[in-house]
Image (cartoon, grey):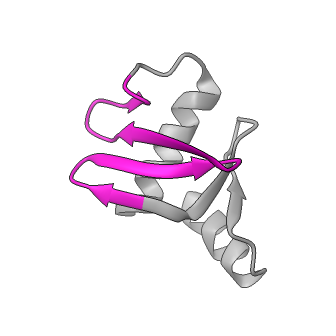
Amino acid sequence: MIGGLVSSAFDASNATIAVPDSSYALDYDSVRANGNLITFKVDGAPMSADCSSGYLNGRSPESRGQAQLVNAVCTVAFGV
């Protein structure tokens, strides 16, 4: 699903994707991996996710939307 969103955004020359089940707009071109730690931007704000622990900005996600954001970022970074 996330791969399809990235492909559609790329085809439309749009650098962001709407993360499913959330209000987040992920700048997929900002996603950078360093091991399991991913840095990225959402609505222009820098954030990080740990794809091994599932943490967002060093903490457990507090909502379904935040969990979906971690999933989306890890999928963009690693294609899993």
Q: Residue at x 57, y 62 (%)?
A: 28
Secondary structure mostly taken by the magenta-highlighted segment of the chain: strand
Which region of the structure is painted magenta?
A: 32-58
- Residue 58 position, x and y percent, is 37, 26
Number of dots carrying numbers: 0
- Residue 48 position, x and y percent, is 43, 41
Q: Quadrant of the C terminus?
A: bottom left
Q: Nearer the viewer, residue 44 or 55?
A: 44
30 sits left or right of 15 in the view: left
Q: Nearer the viewer, residue 11 or 31?
A: 31
Q: Residue at x 52, y 30 (%)?
A: 67
53 sits left or right of 69 in the view: left
Q: Residue at x 67, y 78 (%)?
A: 10
78 sits left or right of 44 in the view: left
28 sits left or right of 71 in the view: right
Say if 63 sits above or below 76 in the image.
above
Say if 52 sits above or below 12 in the image.
above
Q: Quadrant of the N terminus?
A: bottom right
Q: Quadrant of residue 68?
A: top right
Q: Nearer the viewer, residue 22 or 45?
A: 45
Q: Residue at x 75, y 73 (%)?
A: 14
Q: Is residue 34 magenta?
A: yes
- Give the farthest residue toward the left: 35
Q: Is residue 45 magenta?
A: yes
- Give the farthest residue toward the top: 62
- Residue 45 position, x and y percent, is 62, 44
